[in-house]
Image: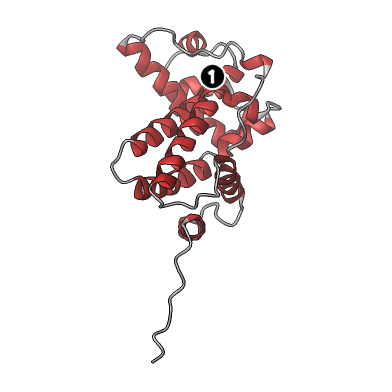
Amino acid sequence: MLEPAPTSRHPALETAPVPSHPLRADARRNREAILAAAEVEFGAHGPDVAIDDIARHAGLGVGTLYRHFPTKADLLGALVTEHLGTMVEAARAAAQTGEPGPAFFAFLRYAAGEFVAFRALADVIAASGIDLANTKGPAHLELMVVIAELLARAQEAEQVRGDVDATDLTTLMGALCQSEAVAGDPVRLARCVDLMCDALRPARPAATGNGT
């Protein structure tokens, strides 16, 4: 789920709506309702779900939906940005704590759950013919930067191996979150994340015997 930052965007998503100024409270509520409904409908019915059904699920008129998201690609792009934005906020909060090691590992556990949950949406985007890597845009780049900062803090505190970089980390996370073995199995996911965390910790000095 986590890849290197994209260098270009899918043409259909170049105009994905990103409000340049704060929305009015009612417009913000409508946008949030549309995104919540879209995630449910896309997850249940795939990329061919009707826009009318999404609007109905959100309790809004189709015209309201189109004012926020003129195309289905815009809507999918906004869902990706929403997910990544939540991840960025969580990573920033973790980076501001006074315990770099525990914060780092807690974020990894949180992120694993989020990306496993995100798989249904990723599958919809892939089925729609849109390159997921290119839908992530600046939000993904921002997430990668914050994760790298979180990792560096933990390494400076000697809580994470010094030979690990952000690419190592995101490769491991991506492989884990794509595994069918953890889909729908939170116990298995938690165990695998714990094993990954153990591998990221610095090696402990070997115990020496006292000869008795």
Give the image quarter of residue 73: top right
Q: How is the image coloured?
A: secondary structure
Is residue 199 in view? yes
Q: Is residue 205 above or below residue 54?
A: below
Residue name at image x 46 percent, y 26 percent: 82
Quarter of the rendering occupied by the C terminus = bottom left
Q: Residue furthest bottom?
A: 212
Instruction: Judge by depth and name the residue closer to the eye, 60 or 85.
Output: 85
Q: Is residue 156 above or below residue 187?
A: above
Residue name at image x 41 percent, y 51 percent: 158
Q: Residue furthest left?
A: 98
Going by the numbered disc 1, the residue's amino acid type is Asp
| Residue 110 location (% of width, % of height) | 42, 45
- Per the image, label 1 sits on a secondary structure element best described as helix
Is residue 59 in view? no
Give the image quarter of residue 13: top right
Residue name at image x 50 percent, y 49 percent: 162
Residue name at image x 49 percent, y 33 percent: 40
| Residue 46 location (% of width, % of height) | 61, 33
Instruction: Judge by depth and name the residue closer to the eye, 74 or 152.
Output: 152
| Residue 10 location (% of width, % of height) | 67, 19
* Dot 1 crowding, Cα within 10 Å, few <14, some 14–19, many 20+: some
**To which residue does mark 1 refer?**
52
Instruction: Judge by depth and name the residue closer to the eye, 66 or 151.
Output: 151
Quarter of the rendering occupied by the N terminus = top right
Q: Residue furthest front?
A: 211
Instruction: Judge by depth and name the residue closer to the eye, 140 or 19.
Output: 140
| Residue 50 location (% of width, % of height) | 59, 23
